Image (tube, rainbow, N blue to C red):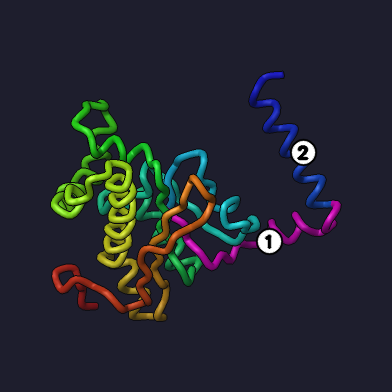
Amino acid sequence: MKEYKKLLLSNKAWAAERLELDATYFDNLSKDQNPLFLWIGCADSRVPAEEITHADPGDIFVHRNVANMVVHTDINLLSVLQYAVEVLEVKHIIVCGHYNCGGVKAAMTNHDFGLINKWLRNIKEVYEKHFKELHEIDNEEKRFDRLVELNVTEQIQNLAKTTIVQKAWQKRQFPHLHGWVFDIHHGHIKEVLNINAGEWTSPVFHYDF
């Protein structure tokens, strides 16, 4: 059987299981979405948001890219962010990285990876900013893990720098921002940073409305 056919068969089995549990499941699912969470995660196939949080369809609005980045020139990310915050009115935004992240690992090297170099530069800037702290860590694997955590922290701060988030804070005191790291070796999520609505803004990036 061709590999993609397995996915289609699995979909049919999943739909049948849902209907067996609740005959109105898809009728309700199709009406609207009201997620509490926006998830900005890594595109890595081993870190599916709903699976590792045991969430149901409709619970989490999801955006994924290489190394869970919040880049101020990424129109895709900003469009998702604006829709989640202004239309869906999510109460929480989660940036979830993961240990053993290929994007972060690549950014720690001096290799030329072609087109993706442009994207990895954003991670390299985090690496450069924290270079001294990171190279005080002798163990290479622990240094790698620490950059994963620092990268998540930087992306949370990038969210707080946007007018999208700051306007929402002023208007309705949401969303709260959460930086998490998924431990791919043990299956647990580690909290590395939480910012309550309006709690943090750099004076340089604070906007008056």
- Count the labels in the image: 2
Where is the C terminus found, in terms of image quarters? bottom left
Q: Could you tell me how far apart the alpha carbons at marks 2 and 1 are, in whole angstroms?
A: 21 Å
Residue 120 percent coordinates (x, y): 26, 39
Whether residue 29 appears in magenta in the rendering, the answer is yes
- Work out whether mark 2 precedes mark 1 in sequence or the reverse, and give the earlier one: 2
**Relative vertical location of residue 3 with respect to residue 201 in this rendering, above or below:** above
Neighbourhood count class around disc 2 (C-alpha, 10 Å): few under 14, some 14–19, many 20 upward: few
Q: Which kind of residue does numbered mark 1 sit on?
A: Lys
SS state under label 2: helix
Whether residue 31 appears in magenta in the rendering, the answer is yes
Q: Which kind of residue does numbered mark 2 sit on?
A: Lys
Write down the quadrant of residue 164 in the picture. Answer: bottom left
Q: Residue at x 40, y 59 (%)?
A: 81
Which one is nearer the viewer's eye here, 27 or 129? 129
SS state under label 1: loop
Neighbourhood count class around disc 1 (C-alpha, 10 Å): few under 14, some 14–19, many 20 upward: few
Magenta region:
20-40
Write down the quadrant of residue 94 in the picture. Answer: bottom left
Residue 135 percent coordinates (x, y): 17, 47
Q: Residue at x 31, y 38 (%)?
A: 105
Which one is nearer the viewer's eye here, 59 or 50? 50
**Relative vertical location of residue 102 with respect to residue 146 in this rendering, above or below:** above
Residue ID for mark 2: 12
Q: Residue at x 32, y 42 (%)?
A: 141
Contact, mark 2 vs mark 1 (Cβ under 8 Å): no
Q: Residue at x 52, y 55 (%)?
A: 188
Which one is nearer the viewer's eye here, 86 or 203? 203
Residue ID for mark 1: 31
Residue 24 percent coordinates (x, y): 81, 59
Which one is nearer the viewer's eye here, 173 or 83? 173
Q: Residue furthest front?
A: 138
